[in-house]
Image (tube, rainbow, N blue to C red):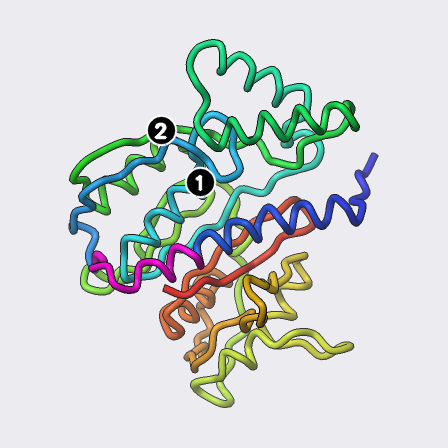
Amino acid sequence: MEHRISSREYRCIALFLLIAAITASAQTARRDHVRRAKHLDNVIESVSLTDGSETIGGASIQDAVNLLRDKVAFPVSLEMLEFERPKDFVTLEEALATLHSMQVVAPLMDGDKNRLDRYEELAKTDPGSEVLVPRQRTFKLVRDRITIREFLVQVTTFDDGYVWKNYGTDKRPQIVIHPRGASALSWPVSPICNPRPVSIDRVLAGCKGQECGPLTGALSQRNISILYMYTGPAPPDPVPHGFVDLCDKTLSARDALNRIAEAAHTSWILGGIKGMRFLSFSPR
């Protein structure tokens, strides 16, 4: 039977991705005065991935991407695996059992301790509910002096559901981490040649009635929506600005997003569940 998604579930799933986007944006704001790596063989002096923003028992690939974005001057984008409800989500009972067993072995990290407190409160009022956090592989990585390339190899070894690729050059890297298997962004994009280059605002314009931006409309047909982020008193623009050359018959959707990221000095992340994916951007 098809699982119908309630408005509450929709909000929770959007919130899951919004947390990732806000985390990345906040890190970007903090790194303005930090010297950032420009090449894959540059060294990160210290890495400590031990706790996850939305995972139990360690960091996830999403946490690794957020950390890396904080360290580098080039785009680092992520296409997350497609999760299905309810089979790919942790239940409240499972989450509590895992956290309690972890607590017996060693003190919980701050994130897990906060989750345990929150889930125990939830169990009092709604014991049968699911925790709307997808199952993800978790890991811990603590290293001094690791190159960007080594970091990427290590985290995609820990979670081998993903691979990484440099879509740029050695001098101008553009990293995308994406599923090892089927991708939601491998379909061809119709070239946009009039005008050339084209405004990114036009390409990603929101839908008004039957009219959508060229890429927005194509994404929407595949159940992918642009996630509009609100991180302060004044809502920021949901899409990057600038101009991009998309007059190319060989571009996939991922290629188009990479060109937008390069032109607008941004990175992108695609996540969500089957039938409802969200695309968001964060400046670098």
**Image quadrant in which the C terminus is located:** bottom left
Among the 4 quarters of the image, the one containing residue 212:
bottom right
Residue 31 belongs to magenta span:
yes
In the image, the segment drawn in magenta is: 25-37
Looking at the picture, which amino acid does disc 1 mark? Arg
71 vs 130, left or right, is: left
Where does residue 118 sit, x and y in percent of width and height? 63, 31
Determine crowd level at label 2: few under 14, some 14-19, many 20+ residues with C-alpha closer than 10 A.
Answer: some
Residue with the mark numbered 2: 140
Where does residue 250 sit, x and y in percent of width and height? 44, 68
Residue with the mark numbered 1: 180
47 vs 129, left or right, is: left
Among the 4 quarters of the image, the one containing residue 128:
top right
Q: Nearer the viewer, residue 81 or 15?
A: 15
Compared to residue 278, the image places residue 146 above or below, namely above
**Image quadrant in which the N terminus is located:** top right
Determine crowd level at label 1: few under 14, some 14-19, many 20+ residues with C-alpha closer than 10 A.
Answer: few
C-alpha span from label 2 to label 1:
21 Å
Among the 4 quarters of the image, the one containing residue 172:
bottom left
Q: Nearer the viewer, residue 104 or 70?
A: 104
- At 41% from the left and 67% from the top, the residue drawn is 261
